[in-house]
């Protein structure tokens, strides 16, 4: 496979979590975004033997590292698909537009791709951008795959079955957090959360999962960024005497919340945090080493963990880090396999076939291997280079790989990888 260098530098000291996962491009992690009804006109084109896929990825700023990794991974998948004969005999062509720094610029990119007649879109990366733009491709009848948007608000979005995600929703992350709490042996949990459109639903999802696991919730305390609010939440938690505290917050406010809680709690009480706190914001005051030793967290797998995938990606684009690259690779492979399994390039038909090709058959991890199975008349189960990946009938992963992380010498380290869900 010929090597190709991507044109943009790596930029992001990434906050590996988010309510969008990783970089937010200026939007809130899971902030709900309203959008007026839109009428979309697409450019009709004859079947010219090309299966066009649009990419909407950040090229500069805090999201550039993820954007570069995703671009390389999608191109890697496209090369494999084209080497195998394409999608139902059609060559895959990738068209990219810049996501920019918010939903407005992402919407311009999507509209441009729709006018070019793309068959599917991969991106944007930010949950806020997906929420703010998804009505456009849905109205146009075009399938979207969101590789890094984790927001709970997308779970019930009216997408007409035209949205799939290859990264687990925060609803599945809630189950992963609950498992880590349960395995700690602590039965009485307090949940402290940033009281915004991201923190509230994730905290409630964690609460529901913990109760399902049989844990007792001693208190559920919201806070804002003000010192008084943090102190009030900390006092509420201290009065409830929990054995473990789950902190749901963003990269900017998580460390402040933990510091405030540590001042009023027994110094043996551990903390379990969500993905956004894996890489605290540069503006956040660092926590003391002794306190960091009590913190563990949960995040969707950030890197594939596959040596063969990493080697192929490095050959494709030597300068990329591979951050969340597997999720972009999965997007294109699932779209192509849905088309191959259904024998169609109609977006709704492709989307309907994706659940079947990602579970219940012979495991395969590349388009060529999976297509061989389809041609042999077998049911297939496409899995990500990162591990198990099963897409449910709503288009969201019902099984995925997570990482439990801790902190050593002020840096996050992966403690283990584990699968959550049925797949």
Image: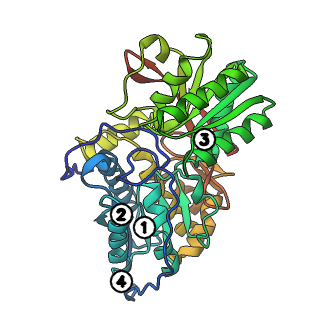
Mark 3 vs mark 1: which is more N-terminal? Answer: 1
Residue at image position (69%, 51%) is 360
Q: Which mark is residue 343?
A: none
Q: Residue 195: x and y, percent?
A: 57, 44
Q: Nearer the viewer, residue 318 or 179?
A: 179
Q: Nearer the viewer, residue 76 or 105?
A: 105
Residue at image mark 4: 48
Q: Residue 321: x and y, percent?
A: 31, 38
Pointer 1 and pointer 4: residues touching (CB < 8 Å)? no
Residue 139 is at least partly visible in this image: yes
Residue at image mark 2: 55
Instruction: State the image quarter where residue 14 is shown.
Output: top left
Question: Mark 1 or mark 4: which is in front?
Answer: 1
Q: How is the image coloured?
A: rainbow
Pointer 4 and pointer 2: residues touching (CB < 8 Å)? no
Q: Under tag 1, what secondary structure?
A: strand
- For residue 38, above or below residue 128: below
Density class for disc 4 (Cα within 10 Å; few <14, some 14-19, many ≥20) is few
Mark 2 vs mark 3: which is more N-terminal? Answer: 2
Q: Residue 154: x and y, percent?
A: 57, 59
Left/right placement of residue 249 relative to residue 317 reads right
Pointer 1 and pointer 2: residues touching (CB < 8 Å)? yes
Residue at image mark 3: 173
Residue at image mark 1: 121
Q: Under tag 4, what secondary structure?
A: loop
């Amino acid at each position: 496979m010929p090597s190709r260098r991507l044109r943009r530098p790596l930029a992001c000291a990434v906050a590996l979590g988010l309510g969008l996962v990783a970089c937010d491009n200026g939007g809130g992690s899971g902030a709900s975004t309203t959008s007026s009804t839109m009428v979309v006109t697409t450019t009709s084109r004859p079947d010219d033997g090309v299966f066009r896929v649009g990419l909407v990825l950040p090229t500069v700023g805090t999201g550039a590292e993820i954007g570069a990794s995703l671009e390389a991974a999608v191109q890697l998948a496209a090369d494999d698909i084209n080497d195998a004969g394409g999608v139902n005999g059609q060559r895959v062509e990738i068209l990219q537009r810049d996501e920019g720094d918010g939903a407005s610029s992402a919407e311009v990119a999507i509209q441009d791709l729709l006018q070019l007649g793309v068959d599917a879109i991969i991106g944007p990366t930010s949950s806020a951008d997906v929420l703010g733009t998804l009505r456009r491709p849905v109205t146009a009848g075009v399938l979207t795959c969101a590789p890094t948007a984790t927001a709970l608000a997308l779970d019930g979005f009216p997408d007409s079955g035209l949205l799939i995600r290859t990264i687990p929703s925060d609803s599945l992350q809630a189950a992963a957090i609950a498992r880590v709490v349960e395995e700690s042996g602590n039965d009485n949990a307090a949940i402290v959360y940033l009281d915004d459109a991201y923190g509230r639903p994730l905290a409630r999802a964690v609460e529901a999962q913990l109760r399902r696991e049989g844990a007792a919730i001693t208190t559920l305390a919201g806070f804002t960024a003000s010192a008084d609010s943090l102190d009030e939440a900390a006092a509420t938690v201290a009065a409830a005497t929990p054995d473990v505290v789950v902190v749901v917050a963003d990269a900017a406010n998580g460390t402040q919340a933990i510091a405030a809680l540590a001042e009023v709690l027994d110094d043996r009480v551990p903390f379990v945090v969500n993905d956004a706190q894996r890489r605290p914001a540069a503006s956040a005051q660092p926590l003391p080493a002794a306190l960091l030793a009590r913190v563990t967290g949960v995040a969707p797998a950030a890197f594939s963990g596959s040596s063969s995938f990493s080697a192929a990606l490095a050959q494709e684009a030597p300068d990329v880090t591979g951050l969340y690259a597997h999720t972009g690779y999965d997007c294109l492979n699932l779209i192509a396999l849905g088309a191959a399994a259904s024998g169609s390039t109609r977006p709704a038909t492709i989307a309907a076939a994706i659940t079947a090709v990602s579970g219940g058959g012979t495991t395969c991890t590349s388009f060529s291997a999976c297509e061989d199975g389809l041609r042999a008349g077998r049911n297939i189960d496409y899995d990500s280079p990162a591990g198990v990946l099963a897409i449910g009938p709503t288009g969201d992963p019902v099984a995925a790989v997570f990482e439990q992380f801790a902190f050593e010498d002020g840096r996050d380290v992966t403690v283990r990888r584990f699968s959550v869900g049925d797949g």
